[in-house]
Image: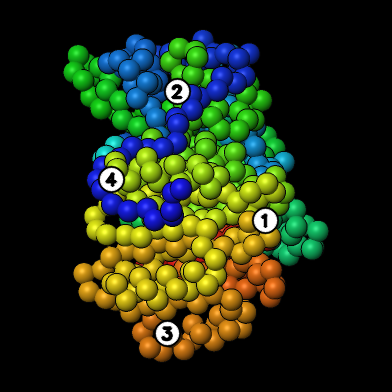
Amino acid sequence: MKNHFLASAASGLMALSILAPSLVHATCDIDTAAQTAPALTSSNWYHRIDGAGNVAASHADGYYQISSASMVNRAAWLDATVARMPVYKPFRDSAVGVVTGWMYGANSRHNALDYANGGASFRVDAVADGVVLWVGYMPSPGNVVIVEHTAKDGSKFRTVYHHLRDGRDEDIARARLTKTYYENGNGAGSFASADAAWKNYQNQANADGVALANGVTSAQLTAIESRWGTPSQTIMVSEGQTVKAGQQIGMAGLTGAHGMNSSVTNTHLHIMFARPAEHWVGGVKKSLWTFFDPHGLYALSASCYQTEYPTGQGGQADQHAAHYAPFFQDFAGLDAGKFQQGFNYFASFGWFPSTLATESSGWTWKMGGSFQYNPSAPVTRTFRTFAQHQSDADTWIPLGWRPDKVVGMTAPDEARFTAIYAPITTGFIARHKMTPSWFGTQINDNYSAGYLLTDASAYLDAGQLFFTGTWVKQPAVTAQYAYQGMTETSLWDTDDTLKASGFKMVSVQKYWHPGLGERYLAIWHVSPKTLVPFVDLTPEQFRSYRDLYAGLFNYRVRHVSAYGGKYAVIFEK
């Protein structure tokens, strides 16, 4: 009979299988003109206009269209157009969707996606970590932000955001310069020759500016702000600023003549993705920023884009997988089935789970956790039975991988185990299915032998309480505290006491004790890091705290656990 001692050995492989992208929307064919622009086609050069309607500054680069005529190897470039870092949709409101796809219509390229929410504004986020290259205003695209994103391998792509809001009064004042800009040599002379969109934009801005200056009723102000937003709805980033994935850039609007077009309810985000491509320029190869479809579709109909990841069709020529991740890198309340998609996506560029939480409500299984860059490519196994978990350990330990973080989960038939493995670099002890008394004895005995408890979890199996635990050999005995059976009050009281002595909470889990009800298990270590713990967060609260600590203050998610649809998280910096 096997015992539960899992020990020693180096090097390993990813344990989750890679799933091939499924083929979707087979009827959404690539439009014949989607990737065949004339050579060196570009109308996307960005400038900043001054208060006199003149160009005051220019962005250094132009942006070009996919062209079989000028690109050195269009097919190879498209094949290499894959995500190399986490990329997310530029919004988080589930009501937002695609209203214009890669093509405006037959043989008319859009080279972008328009996202909208029925004319209502919505929050616009950075799609990935990056640096803001440009913030400016032009009468056609309105307020523009350009962000450059650099992956670990050095590859780059850029995102270009059009039509953002930048304060009601400022945007109206800029829009009222449209005619001046046009007649200052940027149009065909007299504004009378301008197209309807330019005229409509000028006229609406004039009317709204005059109304505000003369005093407006509440109803009039509401109508004006439905178009231009409020004075406080401004661009929230500046040139040279580093931004995090999911960080707010601003609000979707209709600034620019081609933001408003002919409708005062045309609020939307026009976003363009570009990466370098070699084009023939006068017989010389030159690297130019070239637009691509982040969905990988290059389709004509917007309805083709209303689908979950992956949206690329894959089976048709010159298409590629979607860049967008199926969920955010730090997550809670995630359906277990979707986790596999995410694993495959993140692992493709070297990101793996650093912590995982699991829970079940009957046969509905949910997960929380964090994907982070890890070049060691740790083995990850999810929802294993007791026998499977033991078999996994027996397989991976001889290959140099040890159980590092193990979560025991109560399930309808028998307990399930999820494990993240780590390379074996020192002695360790990993046990699962320990009774409370055995767990307590192990804490004391292993500590006396120089092993530090680094991870633990509690779960029920057939109504009985059990624990998992991982101990790692230390070069010198490091102080620790570990307590189970605590109420929430005693958890925080203990935390206050231990913090005063230099100990910091590194792990916490809420669980059900058959005799005592809801209780907490927690571990404290001496650590130079700043650690901030929270318990009982909804998935929405989890994301809000993540935005604050990881997105704004550069913390990372160190630990996540789950209980009753709520999540505990510890941030570390």
Q: Residues within 10 Å of mark 2 (few under 14, many from 20)?
A: many
Q: Which residue is mark 1?
A: 462
Residue 215 lies, with reference to residue 62, above or below; the image says below
Lateral position of residue 351 relative to residue 89, left or right: left
Kind of residue sitting beneath label 3 = Lys
Mark 3 lies on residue: 499
Q: Earlier in the sequence, mark 1 or mark 2?
A: 2
Give the side of residue 423 with respect to residue 514, left or right.
left
x, y percent for residue 30:
53, 14
Q: What is the spatial separation of the Cα atoms under label 4 and label 3, in whole angstroms? A: 36 Å
Q: Secondary structure at mark 2?
A: loop
Q: Earlier in the sequence, mark 1 or mark 3?
A: 1
Q: Classify mark 1: residues with Cα within 10 Å, few (<14), some (14-19) or many (20+).
A: few
For residue 547, above or below residue 311: below
- Residue at 52% over, 72% down: 437
Label 4 sits on what residue type? Answer: Gly
Secondary structure category for the residue under label 1: loop
Give the number of the disc on residue 320. Answer: 2
Closer to viewer: mark 4 or mark 3:
4
Q: Residue furthest front?
A: 1
Residue 235, given in percent of the width and then of the height, sits at 50, 56
Front residue of 101/80: it is 80
| Circle 3: element type | helix
Furthest toward the left, the residue is 284
Q: Quadrant of residue 357?
A: bottom right
**Circle 3: is it few (<14), some (14-19), or many (20+) Cα within 10 Å?**
some
